[in-house]
Amino acid sequence: MKYQCDMIEDLLPLYQDHICSEASRQIVEEHLQECEHCRSTVGLMRDASLENQLQKECGHVLAEHRKSENRKMITAGAVTAAILLIPVIVCLICNLAVGHGLDWFFIVLTAILLTASLLVVPMVAAEKKLLWTLLCSTCALLALLLTCCIYSGGNWFFVAAVSCLFGISLIFAPYVVRAIALPQKLQKHKALLVYLWDSLWLYLLLIVCGIFVGGGHTYWKVSLAVATYYVVLAFLWVLILRYLRWNRWTKAGVLTILTGIWGGLTNDVIKRFLPSANGGLEHVDLSQGFSVRDVDVFGANIHLTVLVVSILAGIVCLLVGIGKGKGDKE
């Protein structure tokens, strides 16, 4: 044989993966015609069972590594929880020692629970850490608000709770919808689900605030009308971005025009439901520029500028989008 088996065996992995040079390939093939041992080695390398065994061993090693890391995280979570119990026990003893019963102790307890939900839960949750952390921290936050409300003798719990839930929903609802298992029919409508969920909490916030302040007919008429005015704009955003098959420039143009119109007509919409309100495009007077001497004129000029600039920018985006569309077709 012209070449030693040791040298050929070094080339066999490259030969098997078809990444060796043409000269090396010819050398290996010539050697394989003469050497039974190297031919059997190639046969073993081509045997799928060997690769499957390696994959199983690799999976086993990774699983053991994950278990080891999970045990370390659980241990760290347990230690953190034990440390957080120290101020709880100290406050309990102090609260009982001064004869206050268990009044403000529950505020400390729920505050510690909120801290634990943010620190301990991510360590001990095996999967979907963000989802479990969000759920536990939200419950702990509501418990803290409730205990503070009861301790202070207030009636503001529902206003504070709905406000916090609305803010949390705005930020984390997309992550929650992606993390939970949805029916097949809803898989393609996640953006719409998030929009509907956030809109629900917005209206709930308006309702609890109206009840809390004893809002009259004017409050309900203006708040619900203005909220619905912008909820419709948000729905159009979702509809255009998610469901319409336009290119990005066309979508940007349409959304820019719509947003400019909605923003420019805001004061006019408010005046329709609240006649005593100031502003409106009827006060436009470009001869005064943007002087603040007359607030109504200043606001009207600003809104007109937003309206015109948005329409012009939107038209430019639309023209670019039309050009892109024609180029794609060609």
Image (cartoon, helix red, strand yellow):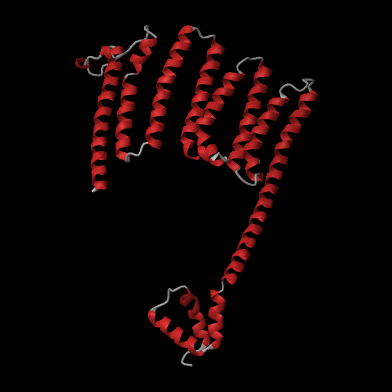
Residue 274 point in image, percent of width and height: 39, 9
Q: Where is residue 114, by image quadrant?
A: top right
Residue 248, placed above or below residue 144:
below
Residue 69 vs residue 197: left or right?
A: right
Q: Tell which of 230 and 137 is nearer to you.
A: 230
Q: Tell which of 34 and 259 is nearer to you.
A: 34
The structure residue drawn at horizontal position 28% and vertical position 24%, both measured from the top left corner, is: 307
Residue 48, placed above or below residue 269:
below
Q: Tell which of 113 and 58 is nearer to you.
A: 58
The structure residue drawn at horizontal position 56% and vertical position 86%, both measured from the top left corner, is: 37
Residue 141, placed above or below residue 66:
above
Q: Residue furthest front?
A: 185
The structure residue drawn at horizontal position 36% and vertical position 7%, both measured from the top left corner, is: 275
Residue 49 point in image, percent of width and height: 60, 70
The structure residue drawn at horizontal position 50% and vertical position 40%, both measured from the top left corner, is: 187
The number of numbered badges drawn on the structure is 0
Q: Residue furthest bottom?
A: 1
Residue 15 point in image, percent of width and height: 46, 77
Residue 204 vs residue 122: left or right?
A: left
Residue 270 point in image, percent of width and height: 38, 14
Q: Where is residue 289, by image quadrant?
A: top left
Residue 112 vs residue 29: left or right?
A: right
Q: Tell which of 99 and 282 is nearer to you.
A: 282
